[in-house]
Every structure is written in C-alpha cells, then in structure tokens.
Image (cartoon, coloured by chain):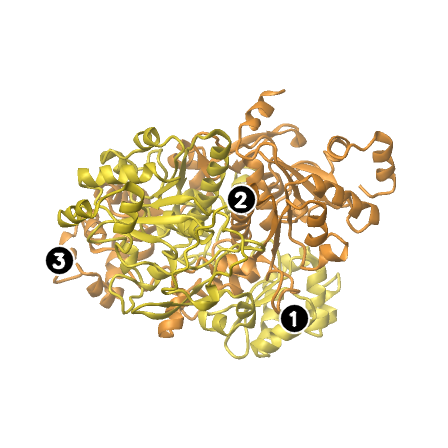
Amino acid sequence: MASKKQTSGKGVDPIMADSAQEPAPPLDGIRVVDVGTFIAGPYSASILAEFGAEVFKVEHPIAGDPLRRFGTPTKRADSSLAWLSEARNKKSVTIDLRMPVGAELFRKLVSKCDVLVENFRPGTLEKWGLGWETLRKANPGLVMLRVTGYGQTGPYRDRPGFAHIAHAVGGLSYLAGFPGQTPVVPGSTPLGDYMSGLYGAIGVLLALRQKAKTGVGQMIDIGIYEAVFRQLDEIASVYSMFGKVREREGAGTVIACPHGHFRTKDEKWVAIACTTDKMFARLVEDAMGRPELAATNLYGTKAKRLANRQDVDSIVGSWTMSHNRDDVMDMCNKADVPIGQINSIADIFADPHFRARGDLVPVNVPEVGEVVVPGVFPKLSRTPGRIRHLGPRLGDSTDEVLSRLLGLTAEELKQMHESRVI
Amino acid sequence: MTDTENAKRDLPLSGMLVVDVATFIASPYAAAILGEFGAEVIKVEHPVGGDPCRNFGTSTRTPDLSLAWLSEARNKKSVTIDLRSKDGAELFRQLCLKADVVCENFRPGTLEKWGLGFDVLQKDNPGLVMLRVSGYGQDGPYRDRPGFARIAHAVGGLSYLAGMPKDTPVTPGSTTLGDYMSGLYGAIGVLIALHEKQKSGLGQYIDVALYESVFRLTDELAPAYAMYGTVRERHGPHVKSAVPLGHFRTKDDRWVAFACTTDKLFERLCQAMGRPELASSGLYGVQAQRLEARHEVNQVVAAWAGSLNRDDILERCIAAGAPCGPLNTIADVFADRQFHARANLLAKETPALEGEVVMVPNVMPRLSETPGRIDSLGPTLGQHTDHVLGTVLGLSPEQIRDLHERKVV
C-alpha cells in the first residue's frame, strides 16, 4: 500500500522523525475536516491526526479558532500554548462559513473527506445550509461528530455549553470538596472537554468501521454533560435503588480507608489507597512499623476502619507528617502499599517515570522555540502515534488544500482571498 | 435468530470476539464499550470470587452482583478459568486463539509468568489486538508498583489542582475517574489497531497507563511550566484565568456554576443580575479589570446568587444567555428534564435480582444509525462457562465436567 508520509522537517523534533521501515500509520488516507473550536470536538480530531489522518482545521479567516488566544500566549501572535499543543498535526484552512461562497466551498471540501468534526451550538450549521442532512446528501459515507454542551436534542440544547458548566450538570462538581463546604473545580476546568473528545474519537472510529462494511456514514451526537455523567461509577444505580445521594468526601472516600491524601514533613503530599485489609496490614506492619494496628479488634478489618475513619486517617497522617515525602514513598513502595506523590507540574518534570515513558515531548516551533507537550496516548506497540508538528499558523495550508482537493486555480484563490472568503 | 441477535448483527463490531480478563473498571470499561457496539465480550474470571468489581461499592440482594458490577459488566458473558493452573492457562490460550481482542490489567509481567504474554498469544494469533492497562504502563521505573485511579490522579497531576488554595488537595470529584479515562483511551487504541489490522492483517498491543490518561487531560499545564516555569496551584471553586468562573451558593443552600470566559458572557450575566452598569468598561466590563478586581467581582456575584433560590437564578441566566448550570446532586440528575429527554438513564430489569429494575448510565457515545445497546447487565459468576467452552472451543460435556471437577473452570 502506498505510503504518503510527510517528511517536512519544519518544526519537527528529530526524535519524532520517521524511519523508513515503519508501516503506514493506522489512519493513513483518512481525511478529517475539523471546524470545531476550543478543545471538546477538536481533541477527537487531534487523536485521529496523531494516528495518521490528514486533518484540515477550518477556521474563520480573521479570528481563527479562539483556542489560539486561550491561556498562555507565546511569541507567535496567533498561537497560545494550548493551541500549539492541541492543534498538533493539523493543517489550517481559512473559510468564512457565513458567506454563501464560503459555505459552498466548505460543502465541497466536506464531500472530499471522511469525517467532519464540529461543535457549534445546535442549529448553527443548519442556518448556513450545512446541516447533517445536506452534507450527507453530498457525501453518503460522511461521518459527522457533533459535540455540544447538551447534545443536539432535549430542552437545554440551545443553552451555551462549557466544560465548567457540564461538570456541574453532569454531577461531578457537586462531589469535589469537603463535606458541607464549597464544591471546588474537580482539578481542571476543561476536563469534560477532553472526556467528550475521547468519546468523540470512539464514535468516529466505530462509525468508520461500520462505513467500511456498508459504505454509509452517520452522525455522532455528544453532550459534554453526558461524557462527564458516564464516568460516575455506581452513583445512579445506588440512588435509584436505595435513594442514597452521594456527597462530597473531601480527600477520602466512604468506601475504603485509609484512602486519601496525606501531608508529609516537608510540606508535600502523598495519595494512599488501601482498598483491602491486606494492603492496610502491609502499610502498618511493613511501612509504619506498627503491626498492632492491623489486629482484628483494632483496625484490621475494613468495617472497623470505616467506622473509625477519622482515627485511622489521623494515625496515618501523623506518620506521614513525621517523614519527608521521598522517605514515605520509599517505605510504602518497599511494602507494596499503593502510594503516589501528589505531583505538581514541577514534580512531573522531575519524575523519572515520565521521562522513561516519553510522556513529555519537546517540539521546536518556528518563531516560538521549544515547546514541551504531552505525548501521544494511547501507546500502540507496532504503529505508535506521532507528533509531526504543533498547531499551525492561521491559514498555513489554505491554498495548498483548496487547490489539491478542490482544484481551485491560483486566480480563483487570489480572488477569494481578496473578498475575504478565505 | 432472536430480535436481539438480529439487531446485533448490524452493529459496527458485530461478529467480533473480545476476551476481557481484566478486573475493576479501567480495562473492562474498554471492553464494555466494544460490547455496547456489538462485540461478543467474554469476561474471564477466577472460579472463586471472580472479578473483585463484583463486590466493589454497594451490594444488592444477590451476592457477587454489586451495582457497579451490574452496570459496568453490561452485555458481558462470564466464563470462569483459573489461569494459575496449567490446564486453565492452556484453555485461555485456546480462547485467545479465537479472539480478535484481549483486554487485561494485571501488573506487568503477570501474564508472562503464566506463559500468556503478548508474544506467546500473538504467535498463536498474529492478528490479535491486546489492550494492557496498568497503573504505570508496561515499562519505566514504576512499572511494578500497584496502580489505582486515586494514585493515578495524584501522579498525573490532577489531584494537586483540586481543592482550596494551600489546603488539603481533595478527590477530583470521583475516585474512579482515571479508570474511566483509561478505558476510553483503551477503546480508542483497540479501534485504531483494528482499523490498521484491516490493512496489514497484523495485531499489536496497546499500553495504557492510568497516570498517563490523567496527565493527557491537563491542557497547557506542561507547556506553560516548560516555557515560563509556571506551577499551577489549587484555586478552589474558581480558576485563575477568568472571572466570574466558579461555584456560588444560592439562597436555598444549593449551588450554581457560572462560566464567564469572555466580556460578552459577563455582560449577559450582569443583565441577568439586573445590574448592566457592572459591565461598563469603566467598571468590570473588561476581563483584565475583572481579574484585577477578582475578589470584588466574585463578591458581587456571590451576593446576588445568595439572594435568590437556585431555580430563579437559572431561569434569569438562561433568559439572558449567561452560561450557568446547577451543581446537580444525583437526585437532581434524576429530576432533570435534559437527562430524561436524552435517555441518559436506562432502566433494566435484572433476572438475577428477581426482575428488580436497576438504573444505569446509558451508552456513550450516541451514534445515529447504529446506536449501541445494553442487552443485559453484569452476569452471575460463571453463567456462560459451559456454553462458551462448548460453542467457542468445541469441548464436549464430559470434558467440561472434568474441568469443573478439577476446579480449572
């Protein structure tokens, strides 16, 4: 099979360069139009791009994707760090969908592609004559991913969608924080965007598989609040069967103990997760040197520990407070007790495991310099994903893509640039 | 053929055989997704006790069928095999020979110890796709450490960011998040590998580490540290980059979330508050001004939120187009019209509970032409052992009886 690898060395770190014997990437030959903004829809397209799909990021000719200005800026005016990382491997094509000529151009582009990713509010593409029914007529094999705050249907479909709100509506935010106190952000505000991106990629891959059998595409409809809600293990089943409303559990959990976060002598933090009696026994006997605590009439059984959660947590907490974090880690690791550092990003950069696994990838970006981004996940053994370059400049591939795929002439392109369609 | 079987034929993964020998949620969730979209999933469990997920969380009236198990082992068939016995390992090898996908999450090296590593299984079945989920991945200095989602949240950098500034970091909402995220990455890996296999005929393995699945979702955390040395800290209910973006208590002691990431959205919130003057450029109309006066802005918004009941606030914000949502408890979720309209909750009659109904989260993602299905909830231990050994491996009733007697299955 023909391999059409891009070997443009521009902005590509040497360690990411291709070697000749490798098989073609898994999604080689798949073309994706990503007209989404920020992270939720676009992250699906990034995953496809990491595994070899050609992704055309369609952006407004003047503003571009607002993600370009989201978070921390760099020396390159249209490229924040979030943009550089999350628009990895994509090609930027500018088209103004609000202009009829632009909409027509977009329709033609989509008819040459396998996948369309979008996250406008429901009805927006329809308003421009670019709804699912129109697009599938032009391209019956099209797979269209639609990510919105609340999905394409239901009473809230027209409301604006943000991951921060989706965490709240999906039931996650209520659970983050100490009992009776203010619920906090569950670690990161765009969490729900990423989760939706993961479900989106799964939907697209399933739909592509079905298309390989039948030739027919389909539409995938994701509400960000749903992606969040799906992650909450037994919470729905327990409420419906027993009427139990889960509350905030602070740093611990009501189902196991000690299972939480503990401060160490050097003002750092560790997470300890003893889900079984055996693990607790190893903690108190081998790591803490207090075997008497594992006696069955004391804290040896889970029921006893749960009934005395505060006591157990305070015994473990005063032990961790009497040692530096690295020593606590060593003692617990030797005893095979599940423990981890509560890593700040500075800790992560110093962590030998992240280094050994290649989780942090430095990429040189023209004008910007070296940018370190999270690597490609998941890790495939034979055809691993790749970062070929980071987020492109606005419109860097407009002419190339429109002439190659749609056969536009230099004259036509010039005219469209002048009338700001592209 | 039954209606169910007929419908299943047309799903994207119909005809595919998945062996799920994993435990708890992370890797099994990947298999559950494959099962929802038509794959036949055979859950291989230890003959005594089975998957510990059967006793995880809240129990039902039937032993070994916790609610988490019933929900997450949806559509699966349970087959017991003791992999530690030689005959059991051989039986498992035979099963993998017939399988398209194997999902596991033992500690690295465990399957190898039993002679069931990827190399061995791949020699039997070159097209095999194997999902391996572990706390820290198949290599690196921590590979042998036990892995749990709570630990992964900590190592992956998420837990450090959850909680009040300088106070104890809290659980980021749910202790099992990292398991689900890893299941999602696992399903993506399997589907990509299957796509590639259609071209090359070859399988491969996918190496998912819980901590990596968490770390990947932390937006610009890594690039900002590398370039500017910025160490992000905990910001409680708020974020550093936008105001007001956070959680606010209402008069009836409930909570709402606002997310004004732009000046326009703040203007709409001020309209909802009946205080359009606050959005003037001389006051708080520009994000930079709001960030400067973060404390004041949050106080004004908090005072307004505290003066009205939650539903009144939601109504006013929705009318003004301001981004606002309730911090739903699970009770709120069950009463929420959107969840009903989108059928996010599915009621399933469960024969193993004498027909009692169990409510579970419905299939995600939602496909228009071939939507996923939940045909049954988690099976009883070994429910399908004889059937699968007979039909998939062609064992005779005598052979199966012998395996039972020797406690291999």
Q: Looking at the rendered structure, which numbered label has been put on residue B280? A: 3
Residue at 83% x, 49% y: name it: B86
Q: What residue is shown with label 2?
A: B191
**What is the chain letter for disc 2?**
B
Q: Nearer the viewer, residue A332 or A351?
A: A351
Supply the letter of whichever chain is orange: B
**Type of amino acid at the residue the image marks with label 1:** Cys
Q: Nearer the viewer, residue A299 or A320?
A: A320
Specify whether disc 2 shares its chain with disc 1: no
**What is the chain letter for disc 3?**
B
Label total for image:
3
Q: Which quarter shows the N terminus of chain B? A: top right
Q: Nearer the viewer, residue A149 or B99?
A: B99
Q: What residue is shown with label 1?
A: A332
Marks 3 and 2 sit apart, C-alpha to C-alpha, by 51 Å
* 3 vs 2, front mark: 2
Q: Looking at the rendered structure, which numbered label has been put on residue A320? A: none
**Type of amino acid at the residue the image marks with label 2:** Leu
- Find residue A246 and report its horizontal and vertical position in percent: 51, 48
- Find residue A173 and report its horizontal and vertical position in percent: 42, 52
Q: Which quarter shows the C terminus of chain B? A: top right
Specify whether disc 3 shares its chain with disc 2: yes
- Find residue A234 and report its horizontal and vertical position in percent: 55, 44
Mark 1 residue crowding within 10 angstroms, few (<14) / some (14–19) / many (20+): many
